[in-house]
Image (cartoon, helix red, strand yellow):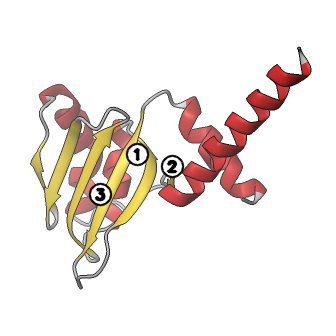
Amino acid sequence: MNQKEKQMVERIMDTEAIGYAYLYPAAGGQRKEYLISTTPENLANFVGSHFMDARQMIVTDMLDRLILDTTGRFLNRCPNQNLCREILKFLAPIQMGEAKPGEILAVDRDTADEYFMEEDQAVTMAELSMQ
């Protein structure tokens, strides 16, 4: 894992709103998985940046509870209506072409798994050195 990827994971963790995004490509093929910040603005940027290449997106929290899913360009389900309204404040201008998606705090799932494995190893080594 390079330093830029590590810093991105740390930025995602710093938001304290973390989940997983599953992108199903419009052209078919294997789904793509990401660790993502689930702040309203970041979710809007993520969804807005994948209008053309995703037929569906599903975002869950770390416990695999649904945050939102999309069909094409639109939010389909978003159980937390307050969160949905916050997302739409950022997403609507992107959908209407009035704004472009901003920076997206996300890394692919393999990178996230590698980061967490390295963190676990560091903790284990620290514990062993204390004995």
Asked if residue 45 shows in the view, the reply is: yes
* Residue located farthest toward the top when viewing the structure as drawn: 131
Residue drawn at the location 23% of the way across and 82% of the way down: 28
Asked if residue 101 shows in the view, the reply is: no
Q: Which residue is mark 2?
A: 105
Residue drawn at the location 70% of the way across and 37% of the way down: 119
Do the residues bearing badges 1 and 3 touch, measured as CB atoms within 8 Å? Answer: no
Identity, as a three-letter code, of the amino acid under mark 1: Asn
**3D distance between C-alphas at marks 1 and 2:** 7 Å
> Reading the chain from its start, which is encountered first: label 1 or label 3?
1
Badge 1 local density, few (<14 within 10 Å), some, or many (20+)?
many
**3D distance between C-alphas at marks 2 and 3:** 12 Å
Give the SS element for disc 2.
loop
Residue drawn at the location 45% of the way across and 55% of the way down: 102
Do the residues bearing badges 1 and 2 touch, measured as CB atoms within 8 Å? Answer: yes
In the image shown, does 116 or 127 lie closer to the viewer?
127
Residue 110: horizontal and vertical position, in percent? Answer: 54, 59
Circle on res. 47: 3
Residue 50, compared with residue 122, is above or below; it is: below
> Reading the chain from its start, which is encountered first: label 2 or label 3?
3
Identity, as a three-letter code, of the amino acid under mark 2: Leu
Residue drawn at the location 12% of the way across and 30% of the way down: 81
